[in-house]
Amino acid sequence: MSTGADDSVLIRQSQKGDRSAFDRLVRMYEEKAYQYAYRLTHDPDEAADVVADAFVRVYNAIGNFRSQSAFGTWLYRIITNCYLDHKKKDKSRYTTSLDTAQTPDGQEYERQVVDPGDGPDVEAERSARESAVQTALEQLPEYQRAMLVMYHVENLAYEEIAEALDLPIGTVKSRLNRARLALREALREDAELFKIG
């Protein structure tokens, strides 16, 4: 990603209206922002929309950023808010499978891809666990899902989550604990995949 020093220089330049500095700032954070949004939405189109909305909000609010928190933390907060806004709108979208392609005459066929990775049994178990976790996450309220992804996937510290969500650290710890318990409960029907007693 970047260092705080790099961020502060680009932020100051962006606040003075330097568009190329803002573009560099976006390029530094766009991959991490997309990964976080994708983990929240589990939909590539929706994740791209969330990130695009988030960077528009950042552009419009960069003049108000006072460096009281890290830029990345501020960005996480904005992405989380955009994600929650998208969930409120609850738009349904038409999607196209990446597993299919079309011949020149318009007929669909399934792509054949050789996977040099793990065998089908290992992959099937991993896929079943990922699917179970994603299904369980989708059952949780959005704020719990966001906290679990921030902590366990994005590896943010309690302090960073507290800054991103504008909550006291004690509240973050207790809500994160409740979110873990809720996730564990949601995974009970798939206990054999996770060895939950």
Image: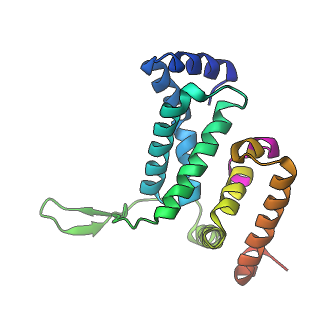
The residue drawn where x is 71% and y is 55% is 147
The residue drawn where x is 80% and y is 60% is 175
Q: Is residue 153 magenta?
A: yes
Q: Is residue 30 above or below residue 176?
A: above
- Please say whether residue 156 is visible from this viewpoint: no
Towards the viewer: 127 or 189? 189
Instruction: From the viewer's perspective, tell me whether residue 121 is left or right of residue 14.
Output: right
- Identify the residue at the far front of this view: 64
The residue drawn where x is 46% and y is 66% is 90
- Identify the residue at the far right of this view: 170
- Identify the residue at the far left of this view: 105
Q: Is residue 66 above or below residue 167?
A: above
In which quarter of the view is residue 186 placed?
A: bottom right
Q: Which quadrant of the rendered structure holds the N terminus?
A: top right
In which quarter of the view is residue 166 placed?
A: top right
Q: Which quadrant of the rendered structure holds the C terminus?
A: bottom right
Instruction: From the viewer's perspective, tell me whether residue 82 is left or right of residue 162.
Output: left
Q: Position of residue 39 (x, y in %)?
A: 58, 55
Q: Position of residue 164 (x, y in %)?
A: 70, 43
Q: Is residue 7 above or below residue 76?
A: above
Q: Position of residue 173 (x, y in %)?
A: 84, 55
Total numbered circles: 0
Q: Is residue 186 magenta?
A: no
- Please say whether residue 84 is visible from this viewpoint: yes
Q: Position of residue 177 (x, y in %)?
A: 83, 62
Instruction: From the viewer's perspective, tell me whether residue 79 is left or right of residue 167.
Output: left
Check the image and tell me how it is coloured.
Answer: rainbow
- Magenta-tinted stretch: 152-160
Towards the viewer: 7 or 107? 7
